[in-house]
Amino acid sequence: MVEAPRRGDSSLYRILGFDRLVDLFESKQLYFSHPSAWEDPCEKLLEHRLSPNIFAQCWCKSGVSDAMWRIYSPNQLGVRIRTNKQKLREQLKASGMDFRLKDVKYKRESELNYEIEAIADELAQSFRLSVAFDSLFMKRLAFKHESEVRVAIYKQGADTNETSLGIRVPIDPFVLIESVLIDPRAPDPYVRAYKHFLKEQLGFPGRVAQSALYAGREPLEVW
């Protein structure tokens, strides 16, 4: 069954390759990328003295999304992990780094440009990390389908080689991850292999199932 969203639910979802999920369990680390690696040029409009030390990760508030499966699981073999805001905050607090977890606001490009300029002016007057974070929680309306919640994290003293790729933050995946949903288009042999590996090899206690987003239905016949 497709997991239906609950009213007032603070659940967060992220679609990734199965290899990355296995790495998450085995390394017990979450990967945060540097904004310079992102594709959208409007997310790179502001640079400042702490830019090399700020990293981010994206989650989605929508648990059922055809668009997200197609974008983030193009080979039809991806998985969707679920957590919630409270668990993610608790895991990040244990890292000891400054961070912000907040919904992304979607704006017209003209409005986005205006607000980025305002943030730049404010930083020039009085530089604060909280203000420097602000630019990472705005995107253009063209990306509204992502329904994104973003986590921005600051790591003091990150070295040049590290910032070119990203950083890893220690977490407990068995506490953080509540369930794993497999791409609805994945072939049966992959579904069985994923379930076996997660349950038998890794000992994951949560729910593992295949999304029923594209499951067949009996047609209504009218003659």
Image (cartoon, helix red, strand yellow):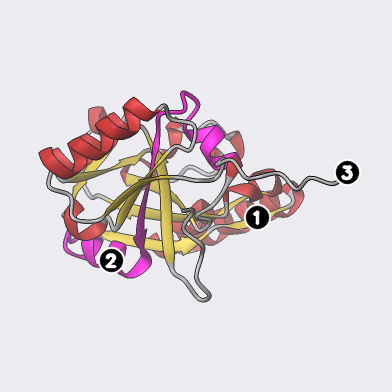
Q: Secondary structure at mark 1?
A: strand
Q: Is residue 117 magenta?
A: no
Numbered tag placed on residue 87 in the rendering: 2
**Res 51 quadrant in image:** top left
* Residue at screen point 50% across, 46% down: 212
- Residue 123, image x, y percentages: 49, 58
Mark 1 or 2: the one toward you: 2
Report how far apart the C-alphas of labels 1 and 2 lie in the structure.
25 Å
Type of amino acid at the residue the image marks with label 1: Tyr
- Residue 114, image x, y percentages: 70, 54
Report how far apart the C-alphas of labels 3 and 2 lie in the structure.
53 Å
Report how far apart the C-alphas of labels 1 and 3 lie in the structure.
47 Å
Type of amino acid at the residue the image marks with label 2: Lys
Numbered tag placed on residue 223 in the rendering: 3
In the picture, which quadrant includes the C terminus? top right
Q: Secondary structure at mark 3?
A: loop
